[in-house]
Amino acid sequence: MQFTELDLAPYILRALNEMGYEDMTPIQEQTIPHIIAGKDVMGLAETGSGKTGACAIPLIQATDESLNAIQALILVPTRELALQYVQEVDEIAKYSDVVPFAIYGGFDMDIQKAKINHGVHVLVATPGRLIDFIWNHSLDLTEVKTVVLDEADEMLKMGFIEDVDFIMSCIMQEYQTLLFSATMPSEIERLTQKYLKSPERIHLNRHQRAPQSLAHHFLHVSRRRCDALVNYIEDHEIQQGIIFCNSRDKASDLFRDLQRHIRSVDIIHGGLDQDRRTSIFRRFRQRKIRFMVATDVAGRGLDFSHVTHVINYDFPFNAEIYTHRTGRAGRMGRAGKALTLVGDRDLRDLKHLLNANRIHAHWEGTAPNLDDIRAKRGRNRGRQRQRGKKPAARAD
């Protein structure tokens, strides 16, 4: 289905056409008509499926430009996602007078307050900063017609659910509620039942967790993990890639090593100040950086349209993290490749990951035999016990 088949304002269609948006994604096709009709919606869909556009387009359509007040409130878990959301709304609304704005921690509240007082129609906010405004600046939410809870499962994981409950209790008038999530833990179902009125439930990932345009590749490595990564990069045509590590320290070590071997690489993690993080994300989107070493601060919700490869240098802690990391490629139906480096100790977790995410593994080089590796490990530990030694702790 194409956007031109919807009864959208001409200025929205013009902006979408310039953005190259012609065909709707499945989540957009199944939710936008319900949102335009004023219904509450609970959308469960894979990462990279177009959920932001599914919200932004009907919200802009419903905005009364002559009313100088916040009419749509969008809650997101992170500053980076807030900025991305505002950018998407701004692009779609560029031929209108609809004003979007984001408030988040780490930025001067007086500047944010001045912008809101000047006039904002669509407010994107992280929960903590929004509560600061409600308590300290008497934020006026009386004209809010739609509330969006985006990446709801991530807000749960980050401990924001009580904040969300408080924020929702501060909006006294009737309003439409839209909830979007990639997974559906029980607490998110509680939110759905509490705040959504007879919602339209859109479940697009009931049988699928990973984008279908994403190929999942794995590389069995031993101790020389960085060498294996460098060889892979040199042997493959990678337009742009994100390389994930499990901690800041590992990311910093890998960044220093990669600088000696490849060009155009930078690093992003939660320890950097907001201005630096924003600058790196902007330069990465502008393709001024080819490789970005990252912790999971870049692993959720963010859309980098030119990323062709996601590389898990460190094996993800769980299947959900794998889903969100690798979802930075293969977005909106674009082709992408995920490469995960797998050590011997990761093989049991890998089997669970493949089953949980319903994906087929393509091996770079020789695929390991899990049974052989377990048998070898058992024999080695047996020899150590025979010698009276304590078996060594496992390490990559």
Image (cartoon, grey):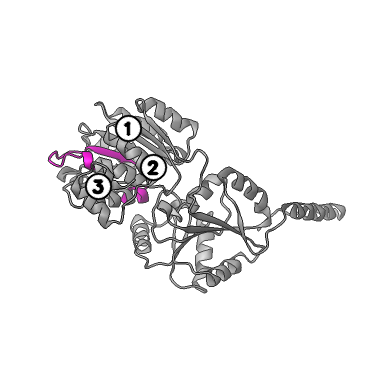
Q: Nearer the viewer, mark 1 or mark 2?
A: 2
Q: Which of marks 1 and 3 is nearer the N terminus?
A: 3
Which quadrant would the C terminus be assigned to in this image?
A: bottom right
Q: Splitting the image into 4 quarters, where does residue 158 fall?
A: top left
Q: Which residue is drawn at 47% across and 35% down?
A: 184
Question: Which amino acid, by three-letter code, is at mark 1?
Answer: Thr
Q: Position of residue 114 (x, y in %)?
A: 18, 46
Q: Where does label 1 land, which residue?
A: 177
Question: Which amino acid, by three-letter code, is at mark 2?
Answer: Ile
Q: Determine contact: label 1, label 2, CB under 8 Å.
A: no
Q: Where does label 3 land, which residue?
A: 101
* Magenta stretch in the rendered image: 61-83
Q: Where is residue 354 in the image (x, y as percent from the top left)?
A: 60, 48
The local secondary structure at tag 2 comes to helix
Q: Which of marks 2 and 3 is nearer the N terminus?
A: 2
The local secondary structure at tag 3 comes to strand
**Residue 94, numbered circle:** none
Q: Which residue is drawn at 30% across and 56% down?
A: 20
Q: Which residue is drawn at 34% across and 25% down?
A: 197
Q: Where does label 2 land, which residue?
A: 27
Depth check: 377 or 250 in front? 377
Q: Nearer the viewer, mark 2 or mark 3?
A: 2
Q: Can residue 6 be seen in this view?
A: yes
View extreme (left): residue: 66
